[in-house]
Amino acid sequence: MNTIRQIIIGFSTPLNPSIFSRLIRFGENLFMNKHVGYSHVYLQFNWEGINRSIIFQTNKHGAHFIEHSRFLTHNKIVREYALPLDLEAFQAAMTECVDTAATAYGVLEIVGIGLTRIYNKWFNKRAKNPLGDGNTTYVCSALTAKVLEAAGLSVFGEYDWEYYGPVQVEQLLIALLSKTPVD
């Protein structure tokens, strides 16, 4: 029996945004030519054994799990997408979450994403994140992308997941759910 499980990919903003959150939103709005009301991406799943809805995310505290209702005391959900996965893909995604928990937040990686946005805008070319560090640290968009890759969902083409910000993760997710390619 091949049981279908669900992961929710959500986009949120803090109820009391820090300057860092505001800068991420400003950069996504400016460089992606799209007004968005979010600066953060997270994964949510149901942990049936304890009857809890769990968020997996990375923020200034690093990669970690948090119960859904506690997450809502500090964040406003802007959009969510339900992604159905077969049991094997779901288990691979959850294994990646557990293996990645407690990894530090990638402040320099965020700066690198900003630099690639500037380069793209000035030269109309894509560039690799010059401050990407592989598996050493994560930002929310890269963490989400890494978990999706672990689940067998190849959505990034020729660019690695350290290139993408929250808006691009949403665009790639929409393409994945509709099976339509997105630039």
Image: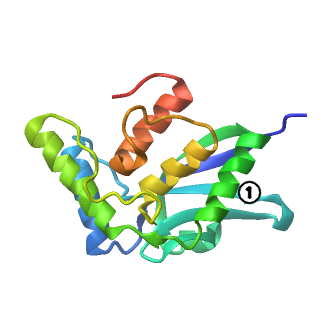
Task: Report the side of 39 relative to 135 (left or right).
Answer: left
If the image is split into quadrants, where does the N terminus sit?
top right
Most extreme residue toward the right is 1
Occupied quadrant, residue 110:
bottom left
Q: Nearer the viewer, residue 138 or 174?
A: 138
Task: Report the side of 181 relative to 83 (left or right).
Answer: left
At label 1, the amino acid type is Asn
Give the residue displayed 84% in from the left and 38% down from the top. Answer: 3
Please rate how many residues cluster around mark 1, counting C-alpha atoms within 10 Å: few if below 14, some from 14 to 19, many from 20: some
Give the residue displayed 38% in from the left and 51% down from the top. Answer: 162
User: Residue 159 location, x and y as percent?
Assistant: 36, 38
Q: Nearer the viewer, residue 105 or 133?
A: 133
The answer to whether residue 165 is visible is no
Count every numbered label the image shows and give the total.
1
Most extreme residue toward the top is 180
Give the residue displayed 56% in from the left and 43% down from the top. Answer: 149
Most extreme residue toward the left is 122
Task: Report the side of 89 relative to 103 (left or right).
Answer: right
User: Residue 23 location, x and y as percent?
Assistant: 24, 64
Structure colour scheme: rainbow
Q: Nearer the viewer, residue 136 or 7?
A: 136
Occupied quadrant, residue 43:
bottom right
Task: Report the side of 86 relative to 164 (left or right).
Answer: right
If the image is split into quadrants, where does the C terminus sit?
top left
Question: Callout 1: helix, strand or loop?
Answer: strand
The answer to whether residue 39 is visible is yes
Which residue does the numbered mark 1 point to in the structure image?
Answer: 46
Most extreme residue toward the bottom is 61
User: Residue 132 location, x and y as percent?
Assistant: 33, 57
